Image (cartoon, rainbow, N blue to C red):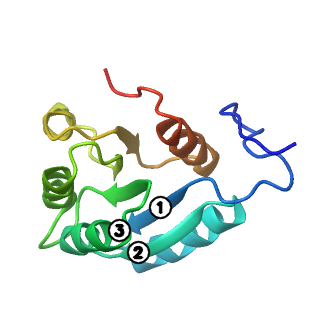
Amino acid sequence: MHGITTNAGNLWNQGAVHLVNVVVIDDDTDTVEVFCEYLKIKNIDVLGYGYDGKKAVALFQELKPDIVLLDVMMPEYDGFYGLENIKKLDPAARVIMVTADLTTDTEKQLRSLDATAIIYKPYEIDNVIDIIHKVHDGLPLLH
């Protein structure tokens, strides 16, 4: 039996084939490398990765991933730039924003730009996997 559930700890049944693909964007190269490897272990297909918001837009346009995982605070082209421009290309795009910034202003700005979900650092990687599957399944995460 192949399938998926969104209960933490029971995300994949054995033998499941690729169900979700992502693009990962963060200015920290080590974070990108470790994160991509973990996603692959969890049977999530990493189509591409980059280190700024401009690359996020280019990869989204080129690869059409199911979900973009996008860091907020990056030099030059930040996550706000990436989110805003991805949503201009496709208002239905699913973009999960990742940030250590707990300020209300940042949350309001991400909501106004229609982020699909917000993950706050530091995060538990298994919670991130759960959120990816919930977003992929179309479950509402921001009110």
Q: Any mark on residue 49, and which?
A: 2
Q: Nearer the viewer, residue 89 or 23?
A: 89
- Percent of width and height locating residue 32: 46, 72
Of the residues shown, which amino acid type is indicated by label 3?
A: Asp
In-image side of 111 versus 20 (left or right) = left
Residue in view at x 52 percent, y 60 percent: 21
Pointers 1 and 3 in contact (C-beta within 8 Å): no
Question: How many neighbours does mark 1 have within 10 angstroms: few (below 14), some (14-19), or many (20 or more)?
Answer: many
Question: How many neighbours does mark 2 have within 10 angstroms: few (below 14), some (14-19), or many (20 or more)?
Answer: many
- Which secondary structure lies at badge 2? strand
Q: Any mark on residue 90, and which?
A: none
In-image side of 116 versus 90 (left or right) = right
Gap in angstroms between the C-alphas marked 2 and 1: 9 Å
Residue in view at x 26 percent, y 68 percent: 61
Measured along the vertical axis of the image, is residue 1 above or below residue 45?
above
Image quarter in which the N terminus is found: top right
Gap in angstroms between the C-alphas marked 3 and 2: 8 Å
Which residue matches tag 1? 22
Mark 3 and mark 2 lie on one chain; the one further toward the N terminus is 3
- The residue furthest top is 143
- Which secondary structure lies at badge 1? strand
Q: Nearer the viewer, residue 29 or 55?
A: 55
Which mark's residue is nearer the viewer, 2 or 1?
A: 1
Residue in view at x 25 percent, y 75 percent: 55
Gap in angstroms between the C-alphas marked 1 and 3: 13 Å
In-image side of 118 versus 90 (left or right) = right
Q: Any mark on residue 26, and which?
A: 3
Of the residues shown, which amino acid type is indicated by label 2?
A: Tyr
Residue in view at x 36 percent, y 63 percent: 64
- Percent of width and height locating residue 134: 53, 35
- Which secondary structure lies at badge 3? loop
